[in-house]
Image (tube, rainbow, N blue to C red):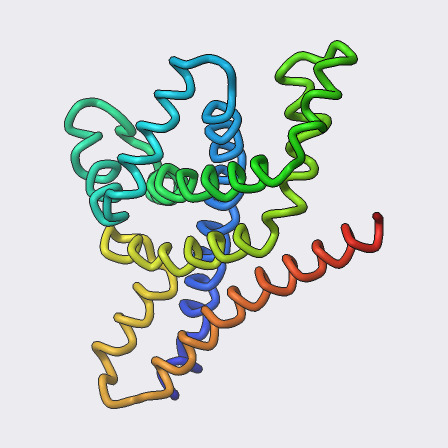
Amino acid sequence: MDDLLAERDLVLQAFWLTIQLAVLSGLCSLAFGTVLAAMRVGPISVLRGAATTYVTLVRNTPLLLMFIFVFVAAPNIGWFVGTPFLVKGVIAVSVYTSAFVCEAVRSGVNAVPLGQAEAARAIGLTFGQTMTSVVLPQAFRAVVPPMASVLIAMTKNTSIAAVFGLAELTFRMRYFANNSADDTTIFLTFALLYVVLVELISAGAIGLERRWRAAR
């Protein structure tokens, strides 16, 4: 515990880096995953097939392999050369998580009554207008709990970034544990910090769901 107090700045920096990685990855995953979901339910067969292939491949690929590709393989072929480690971490996590976001959003789209889309088309709305104005707003309300689960899993998955040099919470926990392996307060402290992040996501999801219910 004394080590943690003496070098608390390192702990706070690691916590802040984990927050940045989780927030940026979450935003990118939500955006890209929503686009993928729209492609999967869209009328263009080529886009639908491409999105389906992407989701199938990524969901069945370990996140560690995604990190290896972004941090090791991609720079060897000229991609992401000179890109900051944080950005690489966001790319790896976002590419992986967006596939799960896609499936969550698609389940919400399927929960929207078909008559809603048909009514939108009847008044002359295009597919894009129907999705953005009619279907997706209702779909997002239906998928708050599963989407929160996806984001919680994503937050915990950011710990893999420690293997590739990002000094986030897991990286710093390993640093302190190497110096004081018998100090259980180190593990409890870092576990508590992860719990804080997870609870913030859960609280946000519950608050959003209650707000939407109250607005009905």
Q: Is residue 66 above or below residue 76?
A: below
Q: Residue at x 46, y 63 (%)?
A: 15
Q: Is residue 92 above or below residue 9?
A: above
Q: Is residue 13 above or below residue 107?
A: below
Report which quarter residue 170 is drawn in: bottom left
Residue at the far top: name it.
124
> x and y percent of residue 61 in the render?
24, 43
Q: Is residue 69 left or right of residue 126?
A: left
Report which quarter residue 158 is drawn in: bottom left
Report which quarter residue 203 is drawn in: bottom right
Of residues 20 and 201, which is closer to you in this image?
Answer: 201
Q: Is residue 68 left or right of residue 185?
A: left
Of residues 22 and 123, which is closer to you in this image?
Answer: 123
> x and y percent of residue 83 in the render?
33, 33
Image quarter (top left, top right, bottom left or bottom right) of the N terminus: bottom left
Of residues 27 and 111, which is closer to you in this image?
Answer: 111
Q: Residue at x 38, y 13 (%)?
A: 46
Q: Is residue 62 left or right of residue 215?
A: left
> x and y percent of residue 214 in the render?
83, 55
Residue at the far right: name it.
215
Count of numbered tags: 0
Q: Residue at x 42, y 62 (%)?
A: 14
Q: Residue at x 60, y 40 (%)?
A: 111
Of residues 79 and 55, which is closer to you in this image?
Answer: 55
